[in-house]
Amino acid sequence: MSNLIKHNGIAADPWTLVSLPAPAEDTVRKQAGKVVIFKVTGEPAATQEQLQTAVIPATGNVIVPLTLWQARKDELASRAARGEIGIWLESYELLEHLLASVSDINSLPVIGINFPRFADGRGFSLAVQLRTRHHYRHELRAIGDVLRDQLYFMKRCGFDAFSLRADRSTEDALASLRDFSEPYQGSVDNPLPVWRRYPRVGHHALAHSKTEPTHDDEVD
Amino acid sequence: MYIYDDIDQRLIDERVAQYRDQTRRYLAGELTDDEYRPLRLQNGLYIQRHAPMLRIAVPYGLMNSRQLHKLADITRRYDKGYGHFSTRQNLQLNWPKLEDVPDILAELATVQMHAIQTSGSCIRAITTDQFAGIAPDEIIDPRPMIEILRQWSSFHPEFAGLPRKFKLAVSGSKQDRALVQAHDIGLEFYLDAASRLAIRVWVGGGLGRTPILGTVIREHLEWQHALTYCEAILRIYNLYGRRDNAYKARIKILVKALGAEEFARQVEAEWALHKDGPSTITQNEYDRVASFFTTNRHSTLTDQDASFEAAKIAEPSFAAWARRNVHGHKIPGYRAVTFSLKPTGIAPGDASSAQLDAMAELAERYSFGELRVSHEQNVILADVKLSDLHAVWQAACQHGLATPNIGLLTDIICCPGGDFCSLANAKSIPIATAIQKKFDDLDYLHDIGDIELNISGCMNSCGHHHVGHIGVLGVDKDGSEWYQITVGGQQGSNANIGKVIGPSFAAEEVPEVVAKLIETYIAERTAEEHFIDTFGRIGIAPFKNQVYAKEVA
């Protein structure tokens, strides 16, 4: 059965996710503290060897890592034109690099954002920026360590598809999309904060419906 | 104070249900320890040395009698008959059972309380001045803005997995009592040249392993933009803050790495895209929230009361208490009263179930049914009439809440330390007790005067040792407990990080070290100087020399 939740239901998945092969062990050691993609966060960059040996299925719809797309764009260009190529980002990658690699962000039928660990929340901000700053309209998919307890937040940040971790039940997870009925703050799914959604009442109205502490000479 | 409407209530009820299900799945083995950890942490539940510790939110330290009675009830039924007020202005239970926590939360929800985001890598409970709304030097009551920020930050979907914890403080007074410079974001209200309300935005302060005071990244922010501006700061931090090393993951490290100017530039660029968007605070919403804090309930009184003056003359111990535990109020005829949770021999900030009930009753009777928790770990009645002070004192005496030591050496800020906390390197409560015992002469304490002594059991600095005039930090050296002493730390508008005086000490040496620091001050001070003033004038050397002087045979 599919482990994809899309548009608030369980859906068949027409896409194959492509990952880079693991780096050779000596490369990891050599890289420690040296080759980093972004100085402040300190994640390692993909090696040429990983990029060249990655296997991309010859046919069908595939979602490829951003680095692979950048390195092997010529090979993938005609398939991209047919709408067969989606791109996924690591949580530490920069949206600027994605934007620079495509002529129009909305030419991508799907963008994936990887959650390497459940607690790594960078993907939430990447989703918000894709939806609000860059006006991305198509499928935005959460991949990686995706568990039901984040789905509600992911949905609010603009994700509309969730590749649930393989060992988890999609049925159970669906319920989590409705954990809260009326959130306080605005986000991508509804930019209005609660006070712009509903007329909320102030002290006078509420104080009269509840029992408040009294004071012998309280005049309020 | 703020009262929940149906929307607020439904959210916390739904939270109880959500957390109950998460706990059920954990106990059924469907969630691993690693998966459950961030979920329970964002609900204030730590696994500690002896038992889980549950941190219950007291938003901006304000609660009502009904809530405090409920907390007393919970400490009796689910804990060992006491609670601990922490430096985050909240209440911690030291002995709840993990499987009872959903029931405790359900109880709390009946009095509009919760434990949402009191720990974990998210936006934490927002803190402020314990005298908010009553302080004579107040420019604006910060509580309406904090309530707006509280709602905005609760379950904020984008910031549910930050690199590390994120603390905000808001100050609305001339003298900062909210430690805005020691928070990830500090919002300082002031009136601009046009007499309009503006916010100075501090970023990147924090204590912990690398104590740094914040930097102002925006001098003038119109209050309407508080949410969109904070959102821009948090977005930059969420994307670029370090996640490879928990000790370097706070926003202060990012601000230092980029430089405050570059950080501010990135925030401004992000903010420009969302400024004036739907999260811009409307006057209408501000006024609605403010209406909960501006109730016109004080009587018209003169600022003098003959019975109060007479009682002070008749009873010197009442006078001593009034001098230390009674504070100014902006409304004539009213005063704030601090119940000291720092009697000698009790862990600083601890209160028994009976004391919790007693304070709730006194609030009901004398202070509009409201109480505040200070980050100095005491409890305050904010609106007591001058003519009621004597009665409040008598009742406080009966319940062991009237130690006249507020702001004195024995009013120690202290984390739970190695007795309870699994992070701690060393015990802190026994150190506090030993110092309190060494300084048991009340006259001497009053003579020493205003001084702040803060103790943390480890680098995480829950006891704010960096900003204590005297700071004590527990460190681990080859498996045994040692204590490093700092001098000259300061909170407030002239915030300062204390300086280490030299090699650390064994536990039993600490009270004597404190005594030598005090002797140095007494010997060097001028008539009007407090400890921190003398330190500022003469520097660290005389203190150091006195402490490390070889005994002369």
Image: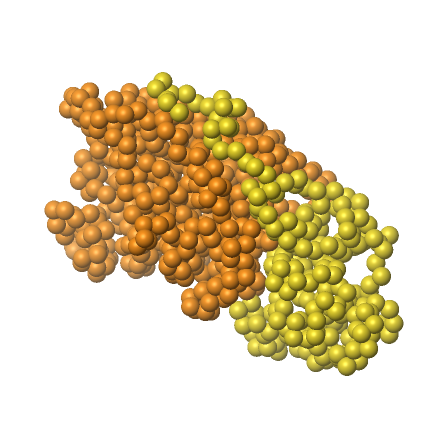
| Residue B194 vs residue A60, the one in the foreground | B194
At x 57% / y 70%, what residue is drawn? Answer: A42
Q: Horizontal and vertical percent for residue A178?
A: 70, 42
| Residue B202 vs residue B508, the one in the foreground | B202
Which tint is chain B?
orange
| Residue A154 vs residue A139, the one in the foreground | A139
Q: Horizontal and vertical percent for residue B370?
A: 40, 29
At x 68% / y 66%, what residue is drawn? Answer: A89
At x 75% / y 79%, what residue is drawn? Answer: A72
User: On the rendered structure, is B268 left or right of B467?
Assistant: right
Taking the view exactly as shown, the residue that stands out farthest to the left is B527
Asked whether residue B88 is in view, the answer is: no
Q: Quadrant of the C terminus of chain B?
A: bottom left
At x 39% / y 34%, what residue is drawn? Answer: B294
- Chain drawn yellow, letter? A
User: On the rendered structure, is B489 left or right of B277?
Assistant: left
Q: Quadrant of residue B318?
A: top left
Number of numbered markers: 0
Asked whether residue A146 is in view, the answer is: yes
Taking the view exactly as shown, the residue that stands out farthest to the top is A216
| Residue B182 vs residue B542, the one in the foreground | B182
Q: Horizontal and vertical percent for residue A203?
A: 47, 31
Q: Quadrant of residue B130?
A: top left
